[in-house]
Image (spheres, rainbow, N blue to C red):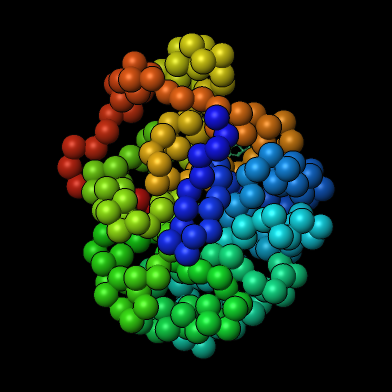
Amino acid sequence: MRQRLITFRDGQQVCPLGQGTYQMGRRRTEEIQALRRGIDLGLTLIDTAEMYGTEDLVGEAVRDCRDKAYIVSKVLPGNASYEGTKRACERSLRQLGTEHIDLYLLHWIGHYPFSETVRALVELQHEGKILSWGMSNLDISDMEHILSLPHGKDCTANQVLYNLKDRGMEYDLLPWSETCNIPVMAYTPLGEGRLRNHKALAEVARRHNATPTQIMLSWVMRNPNVIAIPKAGSIAHVEENARSLDISLTEEDLMEIDKAFPAPTRKIPLAGW
Ligand code: NAP
């Protein structure tokens, strides 16, 4: 069951389950081991950001397997001027100890014009410092703005909040992204770990001989255009999460989940940062 891959517009393929790193660092050795175990299991997309202070940790985790890892990092909006984006990227490369970042995102919308940031991202791509670029926390109107810019159609991904309780993007952003062939990276797919005790998940999990956490991830990844990036700080959690790739939810499962966590029936502005 593990064959399904997400293909970015540049042809790069990744497993629909990646690994987040926000708030890592407190149990550094264990977290590095967890990330490495994830890579061994095929969870090669690792998400970091200059804001998280985890780029050096990610760099250490992939030191002996850089060619297997697909590193995503992000520039803070406050640094996203033309010059600032280039400087931020150089800093991230140094922190990561790598020659290139696979996918570099604008973390969220700031006060610098998109045109400036995108011009820098395109140049960084031409220089080989990033292999592709994308956005985070952008709703449709801002994504349309990005696509209208010179080279804007090279935008490779949009990373947004998506979990059972935050389903707003299903109404419009998700179908729009599919039409534009822009994969969506779902952040906080476990609701920061707070959703797993919800009783609606227990029955579905029982039917699949799975855990509620695995059901949540399988649910996020049910759409072929969505990548889930849970953060897991231990090998046990990574192994548990990886098994979600083997679960196929049935119509009955999805209906039960919808009853407990209703799908949006109208436009809901994108939540998140
Ligand atoms: P999350 O992945 O929804 O939840 C993380 C929590 O779930 C942690 O407390 C973790 O605990 C726990 N967990 C993971 N696997 C588990 C398992 N199998 N069983 C029980 N608990 C488990 O939340 P998140 O960290 O906010 O989001 C994921 C990633 O998305 C971030 O790390 C970051 O890379 C990215 N992100 C991006 C943005 C953005 O603006 N672009 C915003 C937020 C997050 P342990 O650590 O103990 O495993």
| In this view, 112 is above or below 250 | below
Residue 272: x, y in percent?
Answer: 40, 53
- Kindly tell me whether residue 218 is visible in this rendering: yes
Residue at 62 percent across and 57 percent down: it is 70
Residue 81: x, y in percent?
Answer: 46, 83
| In this view, 194 is above or below 93 | above
- Residue 87 occupies which quadrant of the picture? bottom right
On screen, residue 59 versus residue 155, left or right, reads right
Task: Check the picture and name the quadrant holding the C terminus.
Answer: bottom left
- Kindly tell me whether residue 57 is visible in this rendering: no
Residue at 20 percent across and 47 percent down: it is 267
Task: Check the picture and name the quadrant holding the N terminus.
Answer: top right
Residue 153: x, y in percent?
Answer: 34, 70
- Residue 96 occupies which quadrant of the picture? bottom right
Residue projecting furthest to the left:
266
Residue at 48 percent across and 31 percent down: it is 218
- Where is ligand 1, by quadrant? top right
| In this view, 82 is above or below 156 | below
Residue 112: x, y in percent?
Answer: 39, 80
On screen, residue 134 versus residue 240, left or right, reads left
Residue at 33 percent across and 28 percent down: it is 261
| In this view, 257 is above or below 226 | above
On screen, residue 191 versus residue 39, left or right, reads left
